[in-house]
Amino acid sequence: MRFLPATILLTSFIGIAVFGVFGMYHGQAHAMDQNNCIAATAKGMDCPKEAGAVDFTAFHIDAYKGLSLATFGENVMKAFLLVSASLLFIGLAFFSPHLFKPPQLAFYRYQFRDSFSPPQKQQLTRWLALHENSPAAL
């Protein structure tokens, strides 16, 4: 039951990491129109138009690395932690209902405590009964 959601989540993260680069525009109009380049938008500067292939590639790879570095404010982190904690609590309450039930008192155990004799006690009683002196018959 946990395998399927974990597999879907892992597949989605791998898919975003591998295929996220295709979100960038790689057409011929790249050098002509800066609005099509997600790297230029992310870095806040124009793409290197007259640079070589190495500089052009380094600029876009650096922008791609920068897209994965997310910085959040304090309020966003508090909201994220609150939502995560509430989802965890709801998940635990749903999938583990015995965690939140009041403990059941075990009065029934004390009801039969005198009638139960452990196997060792039974063996000892039997052994003593076998070795008991029978009344002497004359």
Image: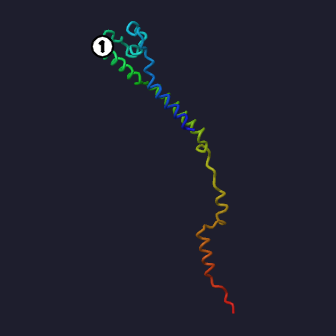
**Position of 74 relative to 115 (above/below):** above
Residue situated in front as seen by the camera: 130 or 55 = 55
Residue 42 is drawn in which quadrant? top left
**Position of 71 relative to 101 (above/below):** above
Residue that carries the numbered disc 1 in the rendered image: 52
Q: Give the residue type that dot 1 points to.
A: Gly
Q: Is residue 84 left or right of residue 116?
A: left
* Neighbours of disc 1 within 10 Å: few (<14), some (14-19), many (20+): few
Residue at image coords 45%, 22%:
20
Residue at image coords 55%, 35%:
4
Residue situated in front as seen by the camera: 71 or 64 = 64
Q: Find residue 70 and report its horizontal and vertical position in percent.
A: 42, 24
**Position of 101 relative to 38 (above/below):** below
Q: Identify the secondary structure beneath mark 1.
A: loop
Residue 66 is drawn in which quadrant? top left
Q: Find residue 7 and report its horizontal and vertical position in percent.
A: 52, 34
Q: Find residue 11 and report its horizontal and vertical position in percent.
A: 49, 30
Q: Is residue 6 left or right of residue 115?
A: left
Q: Find residue 98 and report its horizontal and vertical position in percent.
A: 60, 45
Residue at image coords 31%, 17%:
54
